[in-house]
Amino acid sequence: MTEALKITNLHKSFKTGFFFKRKKILKGITLTVDKGEIFGYLGPNGAGKTTTIKCIMGLIFPETGEIQILGQPYLSLKAKTQIGFLPENPYFYDYLTATEFLRFYSQLFQLRKEDREQRISELIELVGLEKSRNLQLRKFSRGMLQRIGLAQALLNEPTIVFLDEPLGGLDPIGRKEIRDVIVRLRDEGKTVFLSSHILQDIEMICDRVAIIVNGEIVNAGRLSDLISEKVFFTEVIVSGIEAKKLENSGDSLNQHGERIFIKVYDDAKLEDILQLIQSHKGRIHSLIPRTETLEDLFVGMVKKQ
Amino acid sequence: MKIRAIALNTFKEAIKDRILYLVFFFAAVCLIFSRLLALLTVGDQVKIITDVGLAAISLFGTFMAILIGTGLVYKEIDKKTIFTLLSKPIHRYQFLLGKFFGLILTLLVMILLMTVIFLLMLFVHTIQIEWRMFVVISLIFFELALITSVAILFSTFSTPILSSVFTLAFYLIGHFSWGLETLIAKIQSRFLKTSAEVLYTLLPDLENFNYKTEIVHSLPIPDKVILLSFLYGIVYTAFVLAVAMFIFRKRDFI
C-alpha cells in the first residue's frame, strides 16, 4: 500500500441562518496522498480546506464519504497514533510553559517517561524554542505558538502530519525555518499534508497539489504536470539605449531610471530586439522567459469556478 | 492514564482561575462570620456555627461547581484547544471524564480547605467533633459532584451563561422537589396524582444529600439512609455523565 491518505466522495454541509438552511461546504471531495510526499492542499479562503482537515481529524462528521489513514479507518485510535495535526491559528493552554504543554500531550500517547523527556527536548530544539522552554504560552508571539504547535504535532513521531496554514503569522526567517522542517520530515520518510493559500510556499516544497474551490477539487496532480512549460512572454531588462529606439520592438515597455523593461510576447521578435540593443551598444541586464506559475494556474481555476 | 492526564491538566487550569479564589474567599468570610453570629446568639453557639458553616460549605461549593463546571469544557471548545486534543489517540468520552475528574479534584481540595476552616471554628467552641460531621460533608461533596456532572452536560451543547442558568435551575428544582410529596398526598384526581408521582421520580431530589438539620439537632440518621444517599449520588452522576457523553460523541466542532 502506497497511500497514506485516501478520501472518497466526502460531503459535508452546515445549517446556517435563521431557517437553518443547509449550506454545502464539501461537495464530493476525492483525493489520495501517497506515502512520503508533501501534498499541497490549495484553495482560496472559505473553499473547504479546513473543513476537510476537520473531517479527517474526526472533529466534524461528514454526511457521506470514506476516509482512510494508512489503511485504517480514520477514527480508529490506531490511525490516530500515527498522525500529527497543527490547526490553523493554534491556541493552546496559555497557563502552561512550553515544556509542560508538550509533557501533557505526550502523556496522551503513553510514551515512557524517559522517552518523553528526551523527545520534548529534541522537539523544542527542532522548532527553535530552546530559550523559551520555561516560558508560559500566554507570553508567546503568534510565530512562537505556531512553532510549539508544530512541535506538539510531531510528539508521537507521526507517519503523516496534517498542517493547516503552518506558515501563517511567521516572519520570512521563521517561514524558511518551518519550510526546512517540513522538507526534513519528507526526507525522513514522513508524509505531509499541507493546507495553505500561500502559493509561493506550496510551489517551493510540495510534490503534488490539489486545488479546492467551492468545496470541489478542480485540479490535482504533480506540479510539473499541472503547470505548463510554455513561455508566456520574455522579460528583457536593458540600459544604455534610448527608450525611443525600442518603442516598436516589444509589446510593453517601461522605464525605471536608466533601466528599460521590455515584455516580448512573440519569440520571433526577440532575436531582432537583441540585435538592435547590440547595435546601439546597449547593455542587457537580464532576459527571463516567464512560464506559467502556480499562481497563474490557481487564479485561472478560481476565476473559472 | 489518558483520563488522568486530562484531569490533572483541568485541575491545574481550575486552580489558576481567579473566580474560584474569590468564591473561596467569601466562603472563608462566611465561615468566620458564623463565629460572630454565634456570639450574638443566646443559646447553643455550636449549633449556630455548625448550621451556618455547613450551609456556607454547601452554597459556595455549589457556586464553585457551577462556575468551573460550565466554564472549563466550553473554554476548550471556544478557544479551540479541543482541536489538537481530540486529534490525539483519545476517545471523546475520555476527554469528558478527564474534565469531570479534574473538576472533582478541584472541588475536593476546596471542600477540604473549607472543612479545615469550619472545624477550626468549631474547635474553638467544642473539643468534641462528631464523626458524623465528616459523613455529612462527604454527602455535600457528592451533591457537588452531581451538580458538576449536570454543568458538564449543559456545557456540551450550550454557552456558559445558559449552562449556569440551567444548572442553577437543576439545583433549585432538586432542593424543592420534595414539595411534590406533599402535593401528591393532597391531589384527589388519579391522573394528576400519577403524573405528579412520575414527575417526582424523574426530578432530582437533592435533599437526599442534606443532613444539616439532623447533625445540628443531634437527630439520628440511619446507616441505610446514608448508604442510599451515597448510592443515589453515584447512580445519578453516572447517568448524567452518560447522557453528556452521548451528546458529545456526535458533536461537530466547527
Image (cartoon, coloured by chain):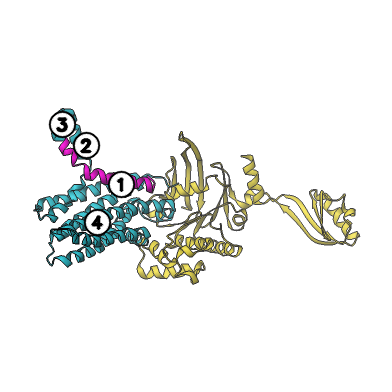
Mark 3 sits on what residue? Answer: B187
**Residue shown at 19% from the left, 60% from the top:** B38
Q: Are marks 3 and 1 in contact (CB under 8 Å)?
A: no
Numbered circle sitting on residue B199: 2
Q: Which chain is yellow?
A: A
| Amino acid type assigned to the residue bearing label 4 in the image | Ala
Quadrant where the C terminus of chain A sits is top right
The magenta-colored residue range is B158-183
| Distance between mark 3 and mark 4 Cα atoms | 36 Å
Mark 1 sits on what residue? Answer: B167
Q: Nearer the viewer, residue B221 or A12?
A: B221
Callout 3 and callout 2 share a chain: yes
Which badge, 4 or 2, is on the more N-terminal residue? 4
- Front tag of 3 and 2: 3
- Front tag of 3 and 4: 4
Q: Are marks 4 and 2 in contact (CB under 8 Å)?
A: no
Question: Chain B hue?
Answer: cyan
List x then y, in percent, for residue A38.
54, 56
Q: Quadrant of residue B100?
A: bottom left
Q: Nearer the viewer, residue A70 or A298?
A: A298
Q: Is residue A130 left or right of residue B30?
A: right
For the residue carrying disc 2, how many other residues have a C-alpha within 10 Å: few (<14), some (14-19), or many (20+)?
A: few
Mark 4 sits on what residue? Answer: B56
**Residue shown at 31% from the left, 55% from the top:** B64
| Distance between mark 4 and mark 2 Cα atoms | 30 Å
